[in-house]
């Protein structure tokens, strides 16, 4: 029997992201460092075992740290960054939020009480969405009426077609959240999505995403970079890194896609913004070649 392609089964990287969020919630139990109290519901049974016992959880975290130094800390920071964007959009009553490659994102459910009228569209491959629906059902979590799960294969299907079918309206201001996805896509698929935001969204819309910096001889020895690439190749060969942006080239890259940069955070800025503990010192470092960025359509 041949292995299924990555599009034919639920995403493994989405499960590992949920595991990191679940471990952080058990460890910190606060809104800053461990806010995702729903993450554990999306874990396979053996992952739930990992976080049930303190000793097992500590051992799993240690092994993660050895294989992917800085990854757990990056997941904590990434969750906080996108949580902030999502909550701000709901508080500002932005009409639409689109989750591009939603995975096991729990924000539509964790922040449901903040949502008075915002339409939320979750996009991901069908196997992942089917499993997500089942996990929500087993946890007795209802999908709010404003939330639509729309299946898509980003490499093969038209974003415009899928979104419109799901109820998306071009003329309404939209927040696009694209968390933990860009590096797993071909450059053409990344360009198509950015082009869609530029051409088919309200001029005040925002797309926020994280991306990897291209690896060079100069940065290959940055914190966690070499280990991350080696471990991804060994453990996630079907979901390897395919897209990156050259260091310092993000603004130009976005301009070429019809977007203007609103915000950009390098690894040092990410650490200072999201990983300071109560004493004001860093709780850890992130893998050095990840960045956060947000952009809006360029003024016509």
Image (cartoon, rainbow, N blue to C red):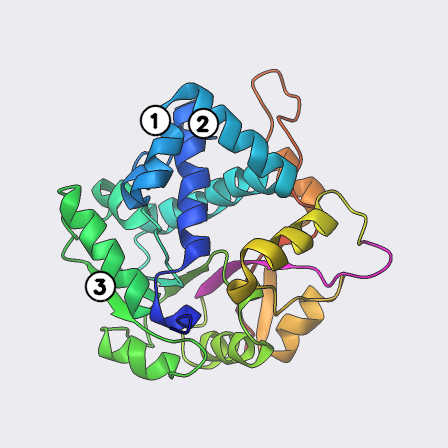
Which numbered disc flags the more N-terminal residue, 2 or 1?
1
Left or right? Give the position of 17 relative to 288: left
Spatial CA distance of label 2 from label 3 is: 34 Å
The N terminus - image quarter: bottom left
Q: Secondary structure at mark 1?
A: helix
**Residue drawn at x 18%, y 58% as measured from the top left:** 146
Percent from the top left, x then y, of residue 131?
25, 57
Left or right? Give the position of 18 relative to 190: left
Q: Is residue 217 magenta?
A: yes
The C terminus - image quarter: bottom right
Of the numbered discs in the image, which one, if any, rests on residue 52? Answer: 1
Q: Secondary structure at mark 3?
A: strand
Of the numbered discs in the image, which one, if any, rests on residue 148? Answer: 3
| Depth order, front residue of 79/63 | 63
Spatial CA distance of label 3 from label 1 is: 32 Å
Extreme-front residue of the structure: 1
Among the 4 quarters of the image, the one containing residue 158: bottom left
Residue indicated by mark 2: 57
Question: Does residue 28 sit above or below 198 in this rendering?
Answer: above
Percent from the top left, x then y, of residue 139?
17, 41
The crowding category of the residue bearing disc 2, from other C-alpha atoms within 10 Å (few below 14, some 14 to 19, many at least 20), is some
**Residue drawn at x 45%, y 47% as measured from the top left:** 17
Left or right? Give the position of 17 relative to 254: left
Do the residues under discs 2 and 3 have CB atoms within 8 angstroms?
no
Which numbered disc flags the more N-terminal residue, 3 or 1?
1
**Residue drawn at x 31%, y 84% as measured from the top left:** 161
């Amino acid at each position: 029997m041949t292995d299924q392609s990555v599009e034919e089964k639920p995403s493994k990287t989405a499960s590992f992201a949920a595991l990191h969020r679940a471990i952080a919630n058990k460890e910190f139990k606060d809104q800053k460092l461990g806010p995702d109290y729903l993450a554990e519901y999306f874990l396979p049974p053996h992952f739930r075992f990992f976080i049930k016992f303190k000793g097992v959880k500590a051992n799993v975290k240690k092994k993660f740290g050895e294989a992917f130094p800085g990854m757990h800390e990056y997941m904590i920071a990434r969750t906080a960054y996108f949580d902030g964007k999502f909550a701000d959009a709901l508080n500002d009553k932005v009409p639409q939020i689109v989750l591009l490659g939603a995975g096991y994102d729990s924000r539509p459910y964790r922040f449901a009480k903040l949502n008075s009228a915002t339409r939320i569209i979750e996009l991901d491959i069908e196997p992942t969405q089917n499993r997500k629906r089942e996990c929500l059902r087993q946890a007795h979590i209802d999908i709010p009426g404003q939330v639509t799960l729309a299946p898509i294969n980003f490499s093969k299907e038209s974003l415009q077609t899928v979104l419109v079918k799901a109820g998306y309206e071009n003329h309404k201001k939209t927040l696009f959240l694209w968390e933990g996805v860009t590096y797993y896509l071909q450059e053409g698929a990344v360009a198509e999505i950015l082009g869609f935001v530029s051409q088919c969204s309200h001029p005040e819309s925002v797309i926020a995403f994280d991306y990897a910096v291209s690896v060079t001889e100069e940065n290959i020895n940055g914190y966690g970079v070499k280990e991350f690439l080696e471990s991804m190749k060994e453990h996630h060969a079907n979901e390897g890194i395919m897209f990156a942006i050259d260091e310092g080239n993000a603004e130009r890259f976005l301009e070429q896609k019809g977007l203007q940069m609103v915000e950009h955070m390098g690894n040092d800025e990410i650490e200072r913004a999201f990983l300071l503990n109560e004493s004001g010192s860093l709780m850890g470092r992130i893998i050095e070649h990840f960045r956060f960025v947000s952009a809006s359509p360029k003024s016509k």
